[in-house]
Image (spheres, coloured by chain):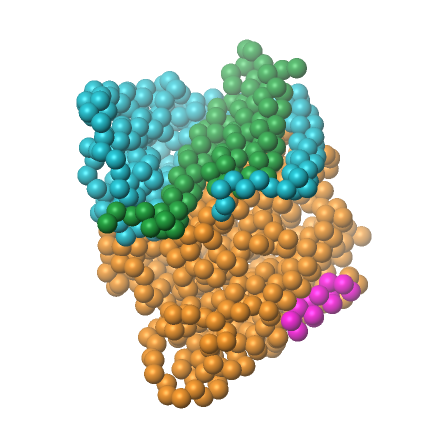
Amino acid sequence: MQSLAWSIGVPLAAAVACFASVPTGVILLLLAACGAAAWVPVWQLYAGASGAYVVGDWAVPLGIGLRLDGLSALFMGVTAVVFVIAGVHALAYRLPERRRSAFWSLWFLLWAGLHALYLSNDLFNLYVTLEVVGLSAVALVSLTARAAALQYLFVTMLGSLAYLLGVALLYAGYGALEPGALRAAGEAGPLLWSVLALMSVGLLLKTAVFPLHFWLPPAHAGAAGPVSAVLSALVVKASFFLLVRLWADLFQPVAASPALTALGLAGIASVLWGGWRAFRAERLKIVIAYSTVAQLGYLMIFFPLAFHTQPFVAVDAYSGMGMLVAAHACAKAGMFLAAGSVLHELGHDRLDGLDGWGVRYPVAAFAFAVGGVTLMGLPPSGGFVAKWLLLRAAFHSQQWLYAAALLGGGLLAATYVFRPLGGAFRVVGHVEKKMPGVLQWSALALAGVSLLLGVVAAWPLDLLEIGRVLETRGAP
Amino acid sequence: MTTAVLYGITGIVLFSLGLYALVVQRHFLRRLLSLNIMGTGVFMVFIASAWRPAPEPVDPVPHAFVLTGIVVAVSATGLGVNLWRRMQAEKRGEEAP
Amino acid sequence: MTKNAGTSAGVRFAAAALTLAVAAVLVQQAVTVMSADRTGVGPLALRNLDESGVSHPTTAVLLNFRAYDTLLEIAVLVIALLGVRASALPRPFETAPAGRMLKSFSHFLVPVLIVAGGYVLWVGSHAPGGAFQAGALLGAAGVVLALAGALPELRAPGTGPVVGLAVFLVLGLQPLFAGDALLYYRGEWAKTVILLIEAGATVSIGWILAGLFMAVHRGDI
C-alpha cells in the first residue's frame, strides 16, 4: 500500500516546510494534507486493500516492514481527527512569536512519529518511533512548562531504554526483530518473561499507569492547550498501542494470568486514584489530567479481559478497548481545548475562581460537559458503547472485580466532571470578555465527535475487526 | 566464557548501575548521566549480540542500531541539559542585561 | 531539584535491592543468550551488500537496508534542536571573552576538523566512517569556534539543521513517483544517493550538535 509511505512522508515534509515561517493559510493546507495522508490508507484498508508494506523493497528480515491493520487504522484515523481540529485551535492560540515556527515543526514531527509508531512492524524501528514521539512531546511541553518537561524527559528516556534492552536481548536470543517471526520462534521461558517485564514496565511508565503516573498531571496540565490535547488524547495511548501489539503478538505464549492480573489491578488502582485526585484537584486542567490517569486504567483492564479463553469475551474486550481509545481521545482533547481556551482568556484555571465561566464562554463549557458524557460512559456517547462492551466481557467471564471498577469509575467520573460545572452558570455581574470563536468551537467539535462515535459505532468496530489477532487464542 | 558473554554481562551491570544511580541521585546532571550509563549498557548488549566466533564476520546490524541509539541519546541529553540550564538561568535571573 | 541532597538510607537500600534483583535476572538471561548459537540478520546483509551501493556493511545497513530508521533518527536530532528553540530565553547568557590562545588555536584546529570531517564522510562507503562521525567532527569545529567567540549570535532559525532531513525526504520519497517503494535505491545510483543523503546529514548533524552546545553555553537559538 503506497499510501502508507505517504502517511509518514507528508507530515515529515510539513515539518520541514514549517522551518520557514509560513502563513496561517499554508498551515491550514498542511493540516489538511496530513489529515488526508492519514485517512487515505485507512479508507483503502476498509475497502479491502492489504495493509502490508516493505520500506526500500528489502524483504523483511533485512528491511523494515510496515503493517496497517484494524487497530492501527483506528488509531491513525483518530489521530488525524484530533490533530486537524486541535491544529485549527492552535492557530488561534497565542504563542510567543519566536516559538511559533518551532511549535509547528514539532507538531508535524509528533504527528509523523505517531503514524510511524502505529505502522511499524519492527521492534528496533519501534524504538526510534517511540523516541520521535517522546522527544517531540517533551519539546512541546517545554514551550510552557520547563520543570514538567524535564521530568517528562527522564520518564520517557527511562521507558525507552527499558524497552530497548528488551529488544537487544530478543535480538541476541532469536536474531529477529519482527514480532510475527519472534512469536513463531519464541517459547515460553525465562528469556521471554524477562523481556516481557522489561518492555512492559518501560511502556507502562510512558502510558502513566498507577503507580507510574506521577509525571502526567504536571506535564499535561502545564502544556499549552492544544499540546495538552494531543498528549492526553494520543501520546499516552501510543505506548498503550505498543503494549497491545506486543502482548497480542509477541508475548501471547507467556501472557500468563498473574501478569494479566497485575495489569488489571494496576488498572483498577489507576481508575480509583485518578478519579479521586481529579475530584480533589484545585485547577481545571489538573482535573482533566487526572481523569486521563483514570481512563487509562480502563484500558489496562482490557488485558485480563482480552486474554480470556472464550473467544467472544476476547472480541468484546478488544472492541471495547478500541472504542474507548477513540472516544476518550476525542472527548479528552475537546475538554483540554475547552480548559485551555478558558486559561488562555482568564489567565488562570483555578476552580474557585471559575464561577460563571459557562455564562462567559458557553460553547467551551458545553464542550467540557459533552466530553464529560463520554468520560462518565453515558449514552449515546462512544464512551458508553466502550464501557458496555467491556462490561459485557467482564460479566461473561465472571470477573466481577473489573466490572465493579468499570461501574465505580463512571460514578467517580460524574463527581469530578460536575464539580467544575457546578458554578459554571452562576451569573456573575456583567460578561466582559469574548473569546475567539475558533477556540471554543474546535473544542466542541472534538467533544461532539466523541458523542457521535456512539451513534455510528458500527463503523469503527468494523474497521477494528480487520486483521484482529486476539481471537486465535480461543482455546477450548 | 566467550567475548560475547563478557560484554553481555558488562552491559547488564552498567544498565543496573545506572538504574540504581537514577533512583538514588537527586541532582539533575547525575540523573542524566545515570540514564546515559544505562544507555551505554544497552549498547554493550547490542555489541555483544553482534559478536561471532573467529572465521565468521560480525553482524553489522546491531552496530547500526548502536549508532542510531547514540544519536538518539545525544539528542535527548542535549535537550535535557538545555532545559535544565534555562530553568536555572530563569531562577537566578542570569540573563544578560 | 535540590543540590544533590542525598536520599535516605531506606530508599537507597530499597533501590539497591531492586537493582540487584533486576541485575541478577538479566545477567542470567544475558549469559544464556550470549552463549547460545548466534543467529541474526547479518549474513543476509552481507549477501546483499553488492546491491546496496556501498561496500561497508554497517553503512549499507544504516543508509540502505534500514535507511528508514536513519530517516527517523535525523528527525529526532531536529526535534532536539527544536525543543531547545521552543524553550528559548528572551536574551542569551553573558559569557567570558575567549583568550587569545584559544582564538589562535582555533584558526588551526577548525580547518583540520573540517577536512577530517570530509574525509570521514567519503571513506564511510568502504571503511568505518560515515555521516555521523563526520557530523560529530563538524560539530566539534562549531564548538571550538563558539568557545573562541568567533560565531555570530544564532537568533534566526536558519535552515542548516533541516537540510539533512529535507534531502533525505526528497530522495526517499522520489521513488514513490516511479511506483517504487519508499527509500528504494539500488545499484550504481544507490552510491550517489547515499552520498548525497550523507552529505546533507553531515551538515545537519554538525550544525545541530554545535547548536545544542551553543544553546547551553551562550543561551542563543
Q: Nearer the viewer, residue A330 or A94?
A: A94
In the rendered image, residue C181, in percent from the top left (x then y), is placed at 39, 41
Q: Nearer the viewer, residue A52 or C164?
A: C164
Q: Is residue B91 left or right of residue A378?
A: left
Report if residue A330 is visible in the image. Answer: no
Q: Quadrant of residue A224?
A: bottom left
In the rendered image, residue C93, in percent from the top left (x then y), is placed at 28, 44
User: What residue is drawn where x is 34% and y is 66%?
Assistant: A93
Report if residue B66 is visible in the image. Answer: yes
User: What residue is drawn where x is 56% and y is 23%?
Assistant: B48
User: What residue is drawn where x is 62% and y is 24%?
Assistant: B9
Which region is colored magenta?
A400-412
Q: Is residue A253 left or right of residue A56?
A: right
Question: Is residue A112 one of those drawn in magenta?
Answer: no
Q: Is residue A393 left or right of residue A92?
A: right
Which tint is chain C? cyan
Is residue A416 placed above or below A358 in the rendered structure? above
Q: Residue furthest top?
A: B55
Q: Main secondary structure of the magenta part?
A: helix
Q: The chain coloured orange carries which letter?
A: A
Q: Nearer the viewer, residue A389 or B63?
A: B63
Which tint is chain B? green
Question: Is residue A410 one of those drawn in magenta?
Answer: yes
